[in-house]
């Protein structure tokens, strides 16, 4: 009876070699899966950035329609604001969510720049702008930078910056 009990105890466990083999297989699978997961995350961030740039171009048009004396907005913060807190103004148009108004969303930094202004009746009117979206960490949160202007065409910089020369298909 004592021999039977000893036999059951050794059969119920794993040997150290078996555990090391299983751990090795798990590590190999992880080294294959992590880069693929990071590529999916980068692609998702880039897709989000392109959609956000399109959205911002549309909201720039809405801003210019609501504030014809000011023209386009040269500030993401001016297009933001808490909806319903007070009536929309040129400084708080309540058109975009807080994440975009802060300039950060899905691993990208957004900005409005290259604004061209004309002064009409002592009021600056913005006639053109450029929206940029650059990855917070090139190669990590995204590979490409994106740009658009009042014409609505989205271009990209394959190096992740704001030198957007290639048209997005």
Image (cartoon, rainbow, N blue to C red):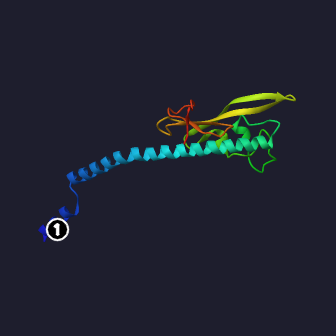
128 displayed left or right of 25: right
Can residue 96 be seen here? yes
Quadrant of image for the N terminus = bottom left
Q: Residue at the spot x=18%, y=66% of the render?
A: 8
Quadrant assignment, res 91: top right
Q: Nearer the viewer, residue 5 or 31?
A: 31
Query: Residue extending furthest bottom?
Result: 1
How many numbered marks does the figure carry?
Answer: 1
Q: Nearer the viewer, residue 162 or 153?
A: 153
Residue 96 place in picture, x, y as percent? 69, 45
The residue that appears at 54% across and 45% down in the rendered structure is 47
**Image x and y of residue 74, in percent:** 72, 34
Callout 1: few (<14), some (14-19), or many (20+) C-alpha neighbours within 10 Å? Answer: few
Q: Residue 97 location in percent, x, y?
A: 67, 46
Q: Which residue is mark 1?
A: 5
Place residue 59 in its image quadrant. top right
- Height in image: 111 above or below 24? above
43 horizontally vs 162: left or right: left
The residue lying at 75 percent from left, 42 percent from top is: 63
The answer to whether residue 135 of the structure is visible from this angle is: no
Disc 1 secondary structure class: helix
The C terminus - image quarter: top right
The reply, left or right, for residue 22 in relation to residue 102 is left
């Amino acid at each position: 009876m004592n021999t039977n009990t000893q036999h059951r105890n050794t059969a119920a466990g794993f040997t150290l070699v078996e555990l090391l083999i299983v751990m090795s297989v798990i590590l190999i699978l992880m080294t294959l899966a992590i880069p693929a997961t990071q590529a999916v995350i980068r692609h998702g961030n880039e897709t989000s950035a392109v959609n956000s740039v399109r959205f911002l171009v549309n909201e720039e048009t809405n801003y210019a329609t609501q504030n014809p004396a000011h023209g386009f907005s040269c500030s993401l913060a001016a297009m933001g604001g808490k909806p319903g807190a007070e009536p929309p103004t040129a400084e708080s148009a309540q058109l975009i969510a807080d994440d975009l108004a802060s300039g950060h969303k899905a691993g990208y930094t957004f900005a409005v720049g290259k604004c061209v202004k004309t002064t009409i009746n002592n009021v600056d009117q913005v006639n053109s702008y450029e929206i940029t979206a650059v990855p917070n960490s090139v190669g990590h949160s995204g590979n490409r930078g994106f740009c658009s202007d009042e014409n609505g065409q989205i271009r990209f910089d394959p190096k992740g910056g704001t030198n957007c020369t290639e048209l997005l298909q």
